[in-house]
Image (cartoon, rainbow, N blue to C red):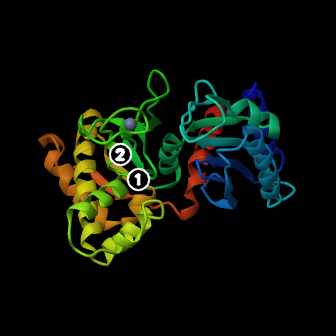
Amino acid sequence: MWALFYFILVYNLNFGCRMVKQYVLGIDIGGTFTKIGIVDLEGTILKNTVYKTGANAFYGDFLNKLEVQVNLLRKALNKNDRLLCIGVGAPNANYLTGLMEHPVNFRWGDKVPLVSEIEKLFGLPVYIANDANAAALGELYFGSGKNMKDFVVLTLGTGLGSGIIANGEILRGAHGMAGEIGHVNVDPNGRNCKCGLQGCLETYASVTGIKRTVFELLAEMTVDSAMRRISYDEMTGEMIANAALEGDEVALTAFEKTALVLGGKMADTAAHLDPEAFILSGGLSKAGAILLNPVITSMEKNLFKAYRGKIKVMISDLPGASAVLGPAALAWQQINRMKT
Ligand SMILES: [Zn+2]
């Protein structure tokens, strides 16, 4: 049905009126914040906004708020501008079913109908992907991955998300679930993970993971540290990064330990996929070289010889509002497919 919709729309836009500008809407649904933005084919964000998701309230409330916020954004469009479709990135969003399935940090139910409800709201085609896969598409279309066909994006936020681009396409897998690198095992007797397993990578290499490491180090080390005066709930990845930049020994050691674990598992991933690069994004990546340098050292040390010195590791160069660029890239990808 949407193929015909696009044919008519794109035909009219291309041949009917030269002044028309085309946009898509990107929606990134996070456990705390939802980010939405109107984005053109070059990745320029015409207008964007951020507001509280309300993951603990009703799904209906979220939809009501989404409608209000999108309608406010739409005011930035000129009379001749066209919004073609909507891309949505969300945790546990499955493109095969159109549902958000068993989202851990949301109280919207086990199967949340994202595609059908958002299509109903706006009368536009809606495409979904899990948030890390959307982030990988954002890098492929608009970011560091623009000139690459094989790379892995690791989003180091509250958890560790991963999106794999293989031969220029998202690797989806048989069940739409490929690339859950956050839940590969680091230590069978290690930290408990929210997923129910023990010793998952994200319990070490994420903002939550490094906080757990900081608190272990504070118990083991006797040196003074700015970290001692911050509670667990108040501590952010940015605070740990800033302390490390100022030479705080506990924070620096925490980054070294995190990088050691992460780099080791990136070497494993390299053996599976032979990527051209790893692109790191999310809160922890803001630490820059403090994270990057020991990650590269650890990865290289653990790499199979054939890959050594060949795989780039970089920090995402997308701007701060980039969370909407991933879902927007997903939307543009679908439009391009319909055209061909
Ligand atoms: Zn896990």
Residue 19 in the image: above or below residue 93? below
Residue 199 in the image: above or below residue 19? above
In the rendered structure, which disc, 1 or 2, sits on the residue that comes first in sequence? 2
Decide if ligand 1 comes within 8 Å of the CB at mark 2: yes
Tell me, yes or no, if residue 39 can be seen here: no
| Residue 235, percent from left and from top | 44, 64
Give me the residue at 26% from left, 40% from top. Answer: 190
Q: Amino acid at mark 2?
A: Thr
The furthest residue to the bottom: 246
| Residue 269, percent from left and from top | 28, 38
Q: Which residue does the numbered mark 1 point to in the structure image?
A: 208
In the picture, which quadrant includes the C terminus? top right
Give me the residue at 79% from left, 38% from top. Answer: 9
Decide if ligand 1 comes within 8 Å of the CB at mark 1: no
Residue 218 in the image: above or below residue 170? below
- Mark number displayed over residue 203: 2
Q: Quadrant of ligand 1?
A: top left
The furthest residue to the right: 79
Determine whether, in the image, residue 329 is placed left or right of residue 252: right
Mark 1 touching mark 2, by CB under 8 A?
Answer: yes
Q: Secondary structure under badge 2?
A: helix
Give the Cα distance between marks 1 and 2.
Answer: 7 Å
Tell me, yes or no, if residue 258 can be seen here: yes
Determine whether, in the image, residue 175 is placed left or right of residue 321: left
